[in-house]
Image: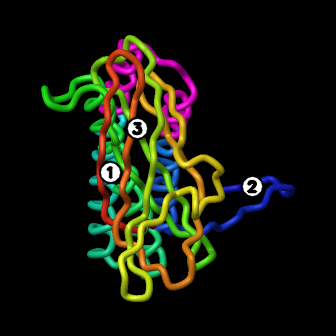
Amino acid sequence: MSTNANEKLVVVPYRPGETLKKRALAWLAIIISITGGIAMGWYFSDLRKEKLGSKNQELNRMLVIAERRATELAQQVANLERGKAIDQAASTDVLKTIRELESANLQLREDIAFYKNIMAPSDEDTGLQVQRMEIRPTRENRRFQYKLVLTQVADNKTYIQGVVAVNLIGVKGGEKEILPLRDVDGAEELGVKFRFRYFQDIAGEMELPEGFVPEQIQVVAQSTGKKATKIERTFDWKVGE
């Protein structure tokens, strides 16, 4: 075999683990970009029922693809490990990526369940609902991020509005204590006003006083108008990742 004098041959080491890792990361990026785009569209658009149904179908399709790909990647890793063709570091990285894919799949499932509940709820769960309360840590020990999600289930033809109050129930100095959200997040009003058709997020940060140990979060939502409704729900204090 002859080569041109100006040409150079470059030997590139073959690392199957790196190739597999790149494939996994590429799939993870695709899933995150699609679900992120869908989520942004939902949060900032006033969607009609048909459009929510269409997005729900798209989520289902992406979930099937993501689960199939995660299974394929896991099988490839197992095959490579058995053949001793992948080093330990690459194996660990790929397995980590697969776990991230599985986490993305779980988020897809939760999103699908969330929108199915809004559009096709059970007979008992209609109207204003306190859907969930999320607590996440920050870099400061006693400071936390919170996100409350309110929904209007099934009856989405008109806007619903009202006020929601949040209380932290806990213990300080051996005695039970109840703190309004206003006392820990710096808000001026005792309750937070809401107005939406499908759902609304109420988010912010809170800083717990020294010595206070939170145990539960009480949420009371009161809508106004002809179909005024009062909904109360209590969540255990649970800090997510």
Residue in the foreground of this view, choosing between 97 and 17: 97
Image side of residue 216 versus residue 186, left or right = left
| Local crowd size for mark 3, using a 10 Å CA cut-off: few (<14), some (14–19), many (≥20) | many
* Residue at far bottom of view: 173
Q: Please, is residue 158 above or below residue 43 in the view?
A: above
* x then y, percent, for residue 78: 27, 68
Q: Which mark is residue 3?
A: 2
Which numbered tag is attached to residue 71? none
Separation of marks 3 and 1 at Cα, in angstroms: 21 Å
Front: mark 1 or 2: 1
Q: Is residue 174 left or right of residue 121?
A: right
- Which mark identifies residue 150? 3
Q: Secondary structure at mark 1?
A: helix
Give the residue displayed 37% in from the left and 67% down from the top. Answer: 238
Mark closer to the observer (3, 2):
3
Label whose residue precedes the other's in the sequence (3 or 2): 2
- Name the one closer to the observer, 153 or 194: 194
| Residue occupying image coordinates x 37% and y 45% | 220
Amino acid type indicated by mark 1? Leu
Residue 109, percent across and down? 30, 43
Extent of the magenta region: 34-61
Q: Determine whether 128 is above or below 211 in the image.
A: above
Place of residue 73 in the rendered image (x, y in percent of width and height, measured from the top left): 34, 57
Q: Which residue is mark 1?
A: 106
Horizontal side of residue 159 vs 53, given as left or right? right
Tell me the CA gap for discs 3 and 2.
Answer: 69 Å
3 or 1: tag closer to the N-terminus = 1
Q: Residue furthest right?
A: 6
